[in-house]
Image (cartoon, coloured by chain):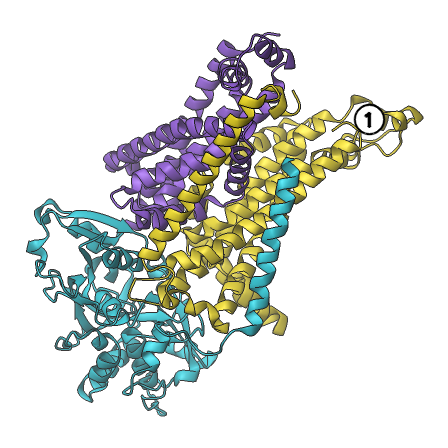
Chain colours: A yellow, B purple, C cyan
Amino acid sequence: MTSGGSILFEAPGPRGRRRNRICSVLAVVGIAAVVGYVIVRLHDAGQFTWAMWEAFTYQGVQRRILIGALDTLKAFALAVVFSLLLGVLLATGRLSRHRVLRWPATALVEFFRAMPLLIMIFALYNMGWLRSWVAAVARFLREHLGQAGVWLADNFASPTLWALVIGIALYNGSVQAEILRAGARAVPRGQTEAAYALGMRKAQVTTTVVLPQAVRSMLPSIVGQIVVTLKDTSLGFIITYEELLYAGKLLAQNTATPAGYPYIPVLLVVGPMYIGMCLALSTFATWLAHRGRQQRRPGLRFRSPADHDRKPSG
Amino acid sequence: MHVLLDNLDLFRRGFVGTVALTGLSTVLALALGTVLTVFRVCPVPPLRVIGAAGVTVLCNTPLTLLFFGVTLGLPMLGLSGLSYFTLAVLTLGGYTSAFVCEALRSGINTVDTGQAEAARSLGMSFAQTTLLIVLPQAGRAVVPPVGSLLITLTKNSALAGGFSVYELFSVEKTLAEEGYAILTVFLWVALAYLALIMMISGVFRLLEHRLAVVR
Amino acid sequence: MRSGTRSRSGLALATVLLALVSLVSCGRGGVPPGSVAALMGARENGIAPSAYPVNRSVTVEGSPTLARAEAAHRIVVGVKSDHPFLGFEDPVTGRRFGFDVEIARMVAADLGFGPGRISWKTVPPQGRETAISKGDVDFYVAAYTINDERKKHVSFAGPYYVAGQDLLVKRENRDIHGPGDLKGKRVCSVTGSTPFQRIEKPEYGAEVSSHDSYAQCVQDLISGEADAVTADDTILKGYAAQNGGRLRVVGRPFSREPYGVGLAKGDKALRDAIDDALERHRDNGDWQRAYDATLGLSGARAPRPPEVIRY
């Protein structure tokens, strides 16, 4: 069953059409009522007064929100890089013939996938060695790398940032490893056999033949997991990493109005930004998946003439 | 070991909290997920749009943001008596329902077209076709993905600890504050989650066997 | 259809994002009214950061902490950033305000460090002892109660203020006059904090709720979700000041929290120097002026500044 809708019901007749129209009207009225109720309640709670929103017209406040967004993207970028690296590493380990590599890789992947990310991030955040390492690296950067070192230390030497990044990378890296492994198992046997026939070693086959194809065929899943990575950066909120949501909270608590702090207005500003970033990424993932479906047999550059005659499925 | 024994009561409370959160959120997620699925395949266009929009937004909202929004927003909407526990169940259940809906929808795609056609030729309405013929079969097909969704839900429930609900993450926080070695605390909490998750995956493996669709 | 909806809504949200970004270029300067910075700026008796004359001839010997700070030409002070009028960092300008901040400025001035040579560092409660003992901060002024457990890890100068757990209520509240009136009342505090653990005791009979920050508790108080917020009176006075007259501190403290300046364990030379500074600024009226300009805005009178305890 490909298109869920039409197969489940007959084309409506006159009575059905009328009933559908009534249902449509009811649904629209229902939604309008809910939205209206929410707006009225928020209005009654004083959430739409000028005092609640005035702060957003100040440059400093806007800049602070942007800095929060950039800090989210900073943690996100680092987490993506490290999780992909770790994913490749763990996938290679799990695909290895050697037990010494396969078993620890499997154990790590299974453990980190089963752990709630927040539990890990919080544990990392509270670990003394993480703090002292970050402090030591910062000292080194400041003392030995001049201007660039100071910039690096100012922007990246934060234990909260690294607790967040390491936690996310361990979890999402494990998931990426499983995605890659599934992709590797889907690579046709002929590919590896041909590579062995050419005299390649196991490691060579894995890194130059299997993984690249696995990455290509699994690209939508990989990007899908990157969306999860972006969403996970919001956990930094709990350990006071100053990402977008936390910046919003700080701004809300900075301004007192007669109706309290402008949490809801801040949420109405910051929420769409977060959701927008995630949506943009998932749209990209959907687009990739769509494109992948149109090109049959992803990963194969060389096609037999017959392939060109096939219609794209999708 | 003494971390666990000295604080057995905390761990028990935390474990019970996590189990209760997960259990109730699961029920809500499955119910709401089914409703959303019906919305998305029904003949009424506005409902389809509502279903699709709801799922898209929920799937792209970080759970932390949703928690923040629900715990601050709902009390302002006249639902002021709700406990943090209830708010957390609503958040977790609502969030997971979007993913349940996505799973069910792809489950519907695995149901043979002939099933729906046969139902319609018997004169069944949309509601009958969907609820009696298609969804039950789709549900059986999506037991494994729903199982992994519930495992994710169990892990996600830790976030409730950051929003004033007492569960296993709160145990970690409390004991860390009291100065216990964080690694030991972490390992015990991790063990509790592992036990829960193994239980869930065991149950679902059993369900998968029992409910497998033989074609 | 699905990818169609997604890309269309994606486009719409991208537009919103773009609009927000472009807004930045057309905003107003300055700090928003109602913010802590604006409230501080609105006072006429404000304390300039340079209010405390810097001691140019410091003669403290035998303090490794001070030697290090002098070599680095700056002193690192650990503070909190989320307590209005106590230890607060303005999220917009990054400026620091509050009673603890003023105390830190006085001490730094007497140690030879003017406002330009202070590096502020926000230290979360979990990291306090580590930050002090590892030397991440040279001294720490942030609602830090002196107690024997902590004395095992750090040394304390002071106390410079004796706080106590108190209650914050709405101005018009008539039935809460102290901890004895909390039976069946909804009281909010910060999850896991000492005040939270105390108020949870059955003897108070309160219905306790908790949040991760006091501001959210204050929000509950304003919206009527809670009848009282409990914390150290200093913290509560800060929120009362921030909410300009709409809230008040009950003023019947039911615990004793002597605040000290935390410093590396065993650095007696530094401890004595800080004790001298605290005494001097208490006696010359700086202490009172700092209180009036910060926590005093709540309308609550200052308690008597405590005697320094040299141990």
Q: Pinpoint residue C174: horizontal percent, then vertical percent.
A: 9, 61
Q: Residue at coordinates 46% horizontally, 80% vertically from top-left?
A: C71
Q: Is residue A278 left or right of residue B198?
A: right
Q: Residue at coordinates 36% horizontally, 42% vertically from top-left?
A: B160
Quarter-wise, where is residue C107 in the image? bottom left
Q: Inspect the image, locate mark 1, and give the three-letter code of the amino acid beneath it.
A: Gln
Residue at mark 1: chain: A
Indicate the quadrant containing the N terminus of chain C: top left, top right, bottom left or bottom right.
top right
Q: Residue at coordinates 13% horizontally, 47% vertically from top-left?
A: C201
Indicate the quadrant containing the C terminus of chain C: top left, top right, bottom left or bottom right.
bottom left
Confirm whether residue C281 shows in the render: yes
Q: A300 and B106: which one is in front?
A: B106
Confirm whether residue A88 shows in the render: no
Q: Pinpoint residue A86: horizontal percent, then vertical percent.
A: 62, 42
Direction left: furthest residue: C180
- Badge 1 is on which residue? A191
Q: Secondary structure at mark 1?
A: helix
Q: Is residue A186 left or right of residue B156?
A: right
Q: Pinpoint residue A212: horizontal percent, then vertical percent.
A: 76, 37
Q: C232 and C12: which one is in front?
A: C12
Q: Is residue B69 left or right of residue B212?
A: left
Query: How many C-alpha atoms fall within 10 Å of the one at disc 1: few (<14), some, or many (≥20)?
Result: some
Q: Is residue A54 left or right of residue C102?
A: right
**Considering only vertical position in the picture, is A4 above or below B171?**
above
